[in-house]
Image (cartoon, rainbow, N blue to C red):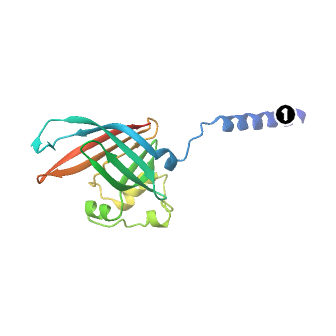
Amino acid sequence: MKKIRLVTIMVAITMLGLVACEKSESPIDESLEGTYIGTLTNQDGLKGGSVVSKTEEDAIAEITKIGKETIEVHIYNVELDTTFLLNYYKYMNNVEVCFTGDDFENMYGHMLGQGHINDGMMGDMQNNETEWMHHLNDEHQNDDEHFGGFDMEDHTFRYRLTMMEGGILYDLQFQGMRK
């Protein structure tokens, strides 16, 4: 009887030790916020009114949480200063982002339909879906395009901005690391 009790106590202590030693992670919404130092690369377009090859310039992205699932992104450098809102969704070791409100409707041709952002996101997730998979399944068509997100292990943020100059569309890619 004493052996069983001793074994039970040792198993309990071992389990407690394993749980206590697990790596703790900060909540996703807190770890997104911050200043990301990086580059803004002209992927295929214009600079100063003429078509150029890839160019890369220093840039900063400031990320601020402004709602339960919404961030404000302020990207700037010498030539660009823009601020916009994005919803964010956990996806394994990453956090993916997508447009909000009117920007979502303008990009995809329909409104956010399931009310996740307003009613407490992802309450109806099923079948081991991640937040991102659930968002894609409920809100998007297969060919919808997305423009960036966060790598939570590397503490990096990437985002592709579509710009227009002189009636010609071109892309700028921000890539930065949180300082």
Q: Place residue 36 in its image quadrant.
A: top left
Kindly identify the residue that appears in the image at 46 percent across and 46 percent down: 32
Q: Place residue 151 in its image quadrant.
A: top left
Q: Where residue 87 sits in the image (x, y, percent)?
A: 40, 56
User: Disc 1 marks which residue?
Assistant: 6
Query: Against 114, is 171 above or below?
Result: above
Q: Quadrant of the N terminus?
A: top right
Q: Where residue 167 sits in the image (x, y, percent)?
A: 11, 54
Instruction: Say whether residue 161 is left or right of residue 91.
Output: left
Q: Residues within 10 Å of mark 1 (few under 14, many from 20)?
A: few
Looking at this view, name the residue that lies furthest to the front: 78
Kindly identify the residue that appears in the image at 81 percent across and 33 percent down: 7
* Amino acid type shown at disc 1: Leu
Q: Where residue 6 sits in the image (x, y, percent)?
A: 84, 33
Q: Nearest the camera: 152 or 59?
A: 59
Q: Nearest the camera: 30 or 2?
A: 30
